[in-house]
Amino acid sequence: MAKIVPMAKTVNTATEIFTSDVVIGLEIHVQLDTESKLFCGCATQPTKKQREQGQDVPNSRTCEVCLGMPGSKPVFNEKVLQYALKLCLALNCAIAPELIFSRKSYFYPDLAKNYQITQYEKPLGSNGFLTLPTGKKVGITRVHIEEDPASLVHPGGNLANASSASSVLIDYNRSGIPLCEIVTTPTITNPEEARAFMNKLIIILHYLGIFDEKNSVIKADANISIKKSGYIRSEVKNVTGFKEIERALFYEVGRQQKAVDSGERLVLDTRGWDPNKGLTFRMRTKETEADYGYILDTDLVAIDVTQDLLTQIKHEMPELADAKIAKYTDQHGISKLDAEVLAQEKKLAELFEKVSKKVDPLLAAKWLRRELVRVMNYNKQTFDDLLIDETHMIELLDLIEKKVITEHVAQRLLEQLIVKPFSPKAYVQKQGLGALSDNKQIEKICKEVIAENPSVVQDYKKGNEKSLHFLIGQVMRKTQGKATPKEVNEIMKKLLK
Amino acid sequence: MADALSIIALKQKLLTGELDVVEHTEMILQEAEKLNPSYHYFNVISSNLARVQAQELRREIQTALKLKDKKKLQVLQQKKLLGIPISVKDAICVKGVESTAGSRILKGYLPPFNATVISRSVNEGGIIIGKTSQDEFGFGGFNVNVGLGYQVPKNPFDKNRTTGGSSGGGSGFTQLTKYTHVSLTESTGGSIVEPAAFCGVVGLCPTYGRVSRYGLMDFANSLDKIGATGKTTADVAVLLQSIAGFDQKNATTADVPVEDYSSFVGKPIKGLKIGVVSVAFGDGTDSFVAERVWKGIKSLESQGASYEEVNLDLPITMGVPTYYLIATSEASTNLAKYCGLRYGKHEPLEGSFNEYFTQVRSKNLGEEAKRRIMLGTFARMAGYRDACYLQALKVRTKMIEEYKKLFTKYDVLMTPTAPIVAPKFDEIAKLTPLQHYMIDIFTVGPNIAGLPHISVPVGKQNGMPVGALAIADHFKESTLIKLGGALEKTCGAGQCACD
């Protein structure tokens, strides 16, 4: 059997995982949402105006430091330490007593200095874990801070075709943007778990407010190997987004299995992911581990991670999704699935917590988790641009709870509320949208509908149940949804006997 | 040289109108142009920049004098380097003036920003007259490892001898010019004091972190220090005071108050405790060099200082290897950016990126630069890193401890700056790289430990100057200035009373 090769930069804390059919370890790079870059004062993002006017010009957010000009020196942005500490704490890591930086040397056109300033000897966070919804704990080997390289722009299209392109452009706007690299232990055993891990991580980043999903990038390198090959691993580089990671890994597991089955001998390699074609492709083989010749970057002084700072950061930490899920299920009796959906979006969770103080938490959970999410998805809105506030939501749910309006009317109101907020209570009164409680009035409308649709009535009498639904629908339309379908149903059936 | 006015004296003459700043600048520029073809002190003489600066100062001075504007005159009076011609080691970036760190690979590079020491000097009224010769990226002790296409500077006392290095051009010109002049020099392992000793001038290398490195093209980031070279300790004190202090652009600068260094020139040294490093006066050091330095020490004693002989272990026995492991490890990463993409000479685009940059570096870096890149890359490779790079860092800590212990008993430690006087070029040519490196034996210690040190001339032997080295505790530059002033009293720069 081929030699088992341990994953790069990971400590194999659980040797027993090498009995699993598939072994996956992730290295995830998260761009931190700071205003300025890691070692200089350049902005990390274009201004809102520049973005709106399409004036995000390449190489416009650069200076002598992030261009690596001879003589320039990096100066650490303290905000990055605060953000990274939050992430380390959320991932249950041990925190290093001081922050020190190293140089990782390799020649590549996206590195102005031909070395990357990163952390090597003592990562800021180590020995942490993240619990998946299944309860499985994925170990975190290390969390460290480093600078993003410049971006290479391939005029010929994507990287898979790059070798045939005659030129490549370099945009240094990205050079020096702060990154956190998160390295897991190789304890992930299938692509779904990798996706769940990424999803969970993104939720944590949102809660911490350190990652801007709209304008920043999260990327994963996945190390993957299978038992059949003797765990000869491939590294799939630069997969963006948690859905893609699952796809890429699913493809790669299949590819390795097929290759081994057809008698091929796998070799260590580095692969790219082509999301359009849905396949991985070889970028280079790795005969040996790369030697980056790490040394300390002595332009940057060691920064003490003091107890005072840690206390301050702990104080600033928000309640995270896991704690909220536990609270919702234990205190309110909400189902785990509903609780998970509510807690997945920080803004939704916050809205829920405010609303559930005034109305029945179960009703609130149902309406926020199902109806609000549905309506927002339909309108392609994200929770970042949620206009609705808790007073409106409380009013709406109060109207439902007290049966002032039907659920049908409430749904219509919600659809309008997320576009332009208003007071549901006043609106219902003004528009006379209160539920019809007078059975005679409903009966009258039912009779009208029966008279208007003789052929449908005949169909029903012949035994076509669907025809009844059509008739009920007509009544609902005439009443503008103010009647409850259940009552209409009963009245209709009585009239058509 | 004896005729040259001190910085303070020249400033007064310029301010009273007795001398004209433009004329004075013109004279030193012409002198530099005249000397350079035979002495090669300058890589670039920045005449245009100097003239513009001088004309601006002339306008300010003349206006203030004409209007008898006391306030304005006071402002000008406070400028520490008013009208003083300053030369700058090539590795220090001057905006718009070709800065190459003495390397062909950077030929044509015009920095878009000033080093902090440049903006501070200019702010104090200094006039930048040019970029001085150095070993390529600072890689040498004799200034013979100049970049491809550069000329080796000649010793002002004997053209067959070295100026010392790597700040050779600045030291040589400081000695040879008839005019008031100071030089911004830089040391990684002894590059300020050693050429100062060989050229018979005063060189002061400050504490690591005392002066901003912003704008210095890096050799070894944990070792590089910008300092001052001048004809006298008094001049050096003025320049150091102008450039020292915290800089938010350089995280390794210390937020420690800057003393009034000039006020320490001529202060009595009574009670100063000197530790004489006896091993530095024994085998391996030319006896007449030892003798000259001893005379200097005795003259200090006659002024009220006391001395004891002390042992110095690690810095002497392990200094050179420790220094070369740390310095080359850092240098090999610093030089990586010179690959012909953003920085470094552009060559025809051929082959892959790896093939391209290999070609650029092979063609444009000198032999010693290549040797140090390889040494440094080796020292930080997996498998060797623990034994070389990391071990050197540990030894460094031990050395600092050893020095710190000595400084509980002594104010300064003294040795010769170099074991020999400036050697002849044909002697240097016979040296192996290792013998070449050993010239730094007395200077690497304080450089590794980040300790301030000064070299002061203590006379000549057969016409060649000898320098005495004094090392003080961190941020005790003032002690060295006091000592320098006292040594000059009896052994005045290049004109030692002992001669």
Image (cartoon, coloured by chain):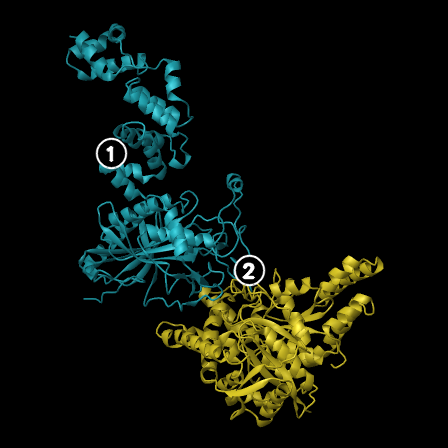
Is residue B58 visible in the rendered image? The answer is yes
> In this image, B254 relative to A409: left or right?
right
Residue B178 image offset from top left, x and y in percent: 75, 78
From the rendered image, report the letter of the chain displayed in cyan: A
- Find the distance from the CA under tag 1 to the CA under tag 2: 54 Å
Q: From the viewer's side, name the closer residue of A52 and A406.
A: A406
Determine which quarter of the picture holds residue A223. bottom left
* Chain B colour in the picture: yellow
Residue, disc 1? A332
Q: Is residue A342 left or right of residue A179?
A: left
Q: Which of the two marks, 1 or 2, is nearer to us in this view? A: 1
Near-viewer residue (A249 or A336): A336
Pointer 1 chain: A
Task: Look at mark 2 in the image and give the residue it sits on.
Answer: B249
Q: Is residue B98 visible?
A: no
Q: Label 2's element?
A: loop
Q: Residue B67 in the image: x percent, y percent?
A: 84, 57
- Going 31% across and 40% down the picture, which residue do you hit? A344
Q: Residues within 10 Å of mark 2 (few under 14, many from 20)?
A: some
> 10 Å neighbourhood of mark 1: few (<14), some, or many (≥20)?
some
> Amino acid type of disc 2?
Lys
